[in-house]
């Protein structure tokens, strides 16, 4: 009977601590129960994720829905557009969810597969969500635009690779700064060896009527504007007739040279100028950025008077044309040229 009485009394005291002991009174702090509560919160199960695909108006799968659950309760969800619609065969073998520590905090983060770009190249895209035990998944801005993302935990950076031309790959490098993923570097590299590159350039050159009757005998890889990115110079044996070609973003003719039209190399591009018959004189100025043509000026004068003056296809004044030429050419220089003979 005494044991029974003590148990009842203990239960009554515990009930009084939970409810208080009356107006103006407070229950004593139960340190043991506080520690237990903290411990229980820390051991809360991590969120589990499942995905489902949803069809769009086309009848193909166009969206992916991701749901986060704890136990049997759904506590978070999001819906994302797929990169391109997919049919049943395309979605059957995909691994839609994966995990990788993309912000290098020691916690694996959620990666949602968004699909492929197969238009002329094969690129995979993902959307990343940062995971933290006490927060909802955090959408990483811009991650879905990184082609073929590669996470480098040693360098603490994320790299993307995309084919930006028939023979070149552009690598973008992103790093975390103040909680944001930002672009820190971008570099384009040619993945053809010199022989294949020149063969490709020759085929490209001979698609232009200016190449008719010209026999290309030599080539040189030169940095025409001193920015660290090389262009390609094709020439005949006299080093007179030929063309200078930009290599980034697909080959692009900077200008054709012949016995009358000569190249002048500047700080940010090339000028090719010379007579074009009778009193006609032509000037072509091309601005480059890492071997990518960004702007073109074409000027034709007759007896010194402007007959045609346009910048990127739009008419401009002579004053603007002269200012553009000065900004591109600056102080002319002669680049180092080492000719290779076919």
Image: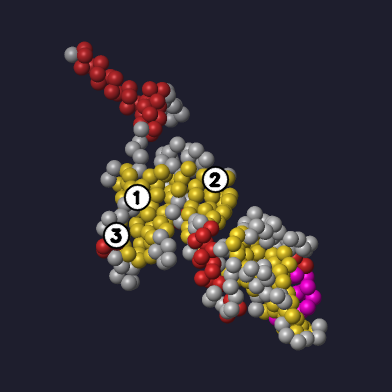
Using the rendered image of the protein, determine whether residue 212 is visible from the camera's viewpoint: yes
- Residue at left 53%, top 58%? 194
Q: Residue 176 has which mark?
A: 2
Tell me if label 1 and label 2 are in contact, CB under 8 Å.
no
Q: Horizontal and vertical percent for residue 89?
A: 26, 62
Q: CA distance from mark 3 to mark 1?
A: 13 Å
Whichever of labels 3 and 1 marks the residue nearer the N terminus, that label is: 3
Q: Camera-side residue: 209 or 147?
A: 209
- The residue pinned by badge 1 equals 97
Q: Horizontal and vertical percent for residue 18?
A: 36, 29
Quadrant in the rendering for residue 116: bottom left
Q: Callout 3: 10 Å neighbours few (<14), some, many (20+)?
A: some
Q: Horizontal and vertical percent for residue 263?
A: 71, 69
- The residue pinned by badge 3 equals 91
Question: Nearer the viewer's eye, disc 3 or disc 1?
Answer: 3
Count the labels in the image: 3
- Residue at left 46%, top 45%? 151
Quadrant in the rendering for residue 240: bottom right
């Amino acid at each position: 009977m005494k044991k029974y009485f003590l148990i009842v009394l203990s239960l009554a005291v515990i009930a009084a601590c939970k409810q208080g002991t009356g107006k103006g009174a407070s229950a004593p702090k139960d340190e043991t129960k506080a520690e237990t509560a903290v411990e229980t919160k820390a051991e809360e199960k991590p969120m589990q994720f499942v995905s489902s695909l949803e069809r769009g108006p086309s009848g193909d799968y166009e969206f992916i829905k991701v749901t986060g659950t704890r136990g049997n309760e759904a506590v978070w969800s999001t819906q994302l557009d797929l990169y391109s619609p997919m049919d049943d065969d395309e979605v059957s073998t995909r691994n839609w969810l994966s995990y990788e520590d993309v912000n290098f905090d020691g916690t694996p983060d959620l990666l949602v597969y968004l699909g492929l770009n197969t238009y002329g190249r094969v690129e995979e895209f993902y959307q990343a969500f940062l995971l933290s035990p006490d927060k909802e998944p955090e959408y990483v801005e811009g991650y879905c635009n990184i082609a073929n993302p590669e996470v480098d935990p040693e360098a603490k950076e994320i790299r993307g690779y995309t084919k930006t031309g028939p023979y070149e790959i552009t690598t973008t490098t992103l790093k975390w700064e103040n909680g944001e993923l930002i672009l820190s570097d971008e570099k384009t590299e040619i993945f053809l060896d010199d022989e294949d590159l020149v063969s490709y350039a020759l085929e490209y050159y001979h698609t232009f009527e200016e190449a008719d009757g010209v026999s290309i005998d030599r080539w040189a890889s030169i940095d025409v504007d001193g920015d660290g990115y090389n262009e390609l110079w094709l020439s005949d044996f006299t080093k007179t007739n030929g063309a200078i070609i930009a290599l980034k973003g697909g080959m692009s003719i900077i200008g054709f040279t012949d016995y009358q039209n000569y190249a002048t190399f500047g700080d940010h591009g090339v000028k090719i100028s010379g007579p074009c018959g009778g009193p006609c004189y032509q000037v072509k100025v091309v601005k480059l950025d890492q071997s990518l043509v960004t702007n073109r000026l074409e000027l034709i004068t007759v007896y010194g008077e402007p007959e045609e003056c346009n910048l990127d296809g739009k008419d401009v004044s002579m004053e603007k044309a002269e200012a553009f030429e000065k900004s591109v050419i600056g102080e002319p220089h002669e680049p180092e040229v080492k000719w290779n003979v076919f």
